[in-house]
Amino acid sequence: MIEISTSILTVEKEKATKTFYDLEVAGTDYYHIDIMDGKFVEKDTREMMYEYASTIKHISNIPLDVHFMVEDIKENINKYIPLSPSIITFHYEACKNDEEVIELINYIKENNIKPAISIKPGTDLESIKKFLPMLHMVLIMTVEPGKGGQKLIPETVAKTKELKKYLEENNLETYIEVDGGVNKDTINMVKEAGIDIAVAGSAIINAKDFKQEIKELKYC
Ligand code: DX5
Ligand code: ZN
């Protein structure tokens, strides 16, 4: 069975605390926190996401799944360490070289957080293969990072399958997460590709009944 990580990117401020509470009751496995810096992607969600993540820490024990779409990765990691996220994901494309990737993985681990790397739809698997044994998870972007509510790009499902095959062939236990455009129409495609965690934002946040939506995504 897969786990569901709910992206809170589109949660409205006025309803935020109640929404976070309702998501816990509905059985989300993680809160997915999308941090954008206005440089790696156009939007800047740093302030709002920090406020949301801090609120969640006060009211819930459900783990935080932090997704950094930022250029200054270390600076942002430092901001989130006090919130003890379960997983920190950063983008391969935001790193200068392989040494920086390895340094960041180690830094995240030293702080007792699980490290993950994300790749954009246009980035090849080949570029991250060497890091897989050091990683807890790979986040395959199934849309271009930057905003919620987009359509899943079908080619990214083939890439997800290829990653699953590679992990199995090499006896690696790295998790696979997909992010973007996951809903009831696309969930089976990504499940068949062998994922462990699906991020869903608008599909859950716009649903009338969070619990029913999460249940359907998990079990359908
Ligand atoms: C996109 C974000 C995603 C996104 C998911 O840059 O990383 O987490 O908000 O939202 P939906 O499920 O609406 O595509
Ligand atoms: Zn995300």
Image (cartoon, helix red, strand yellow):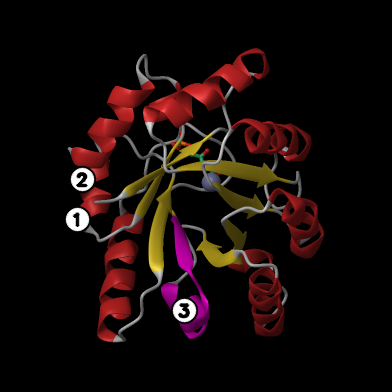
Q: Nearer the viewer, residue 46 or 24?
A: 24
Residue 184 at least partly seen: no
Residue type at mark 1 is Glu
Please provide percent x and percent y for residue 32.
53, 43
Q: Which mark is residue 132?
A: 3
Residue, disc 1: 192
For the residues labelled 1 and 2, say whether their Cβ atoms are less than 8 Å apart: yes
178 versus 55 height, above or below: below
Q: Earlier in the sequence, mark 3 or mark 2?
A: 3
Assign a secondary structure to mark 3. Answer: helix
Asked if residue 7 lies in the magenta stretch, the reply is no
Asked if residue 129 lies in the magenta stretch, the reply is yes
At 39% from the left and 39% from the top, the residue drawn is: 181
Overall secondary structure of the magenta section: helix
In this rendering, position of residue 173 left or right of residue 78 = left
Residue, disc 2: 188
Assign a secondary structure to mark 2. Answer: helix
Q: Nearer the viewer, residue 61 or 202?
A: 61
- Rounded to the nearest angstrom, the CA distance separating label 3 from label 1 is 21 Å
- Rounded to the nearest angstrom, the CA distance separating label 1 from label 2 is 6 Å
8 versus 4 height, above or below: above
Q: Which residues are magenta?
A: 125-140
Residue 173 falls in image quadrant: bottom left
Residue type at mark 3 is Leu
In this rendering, position of residue 66 left or right of residue 36 = left
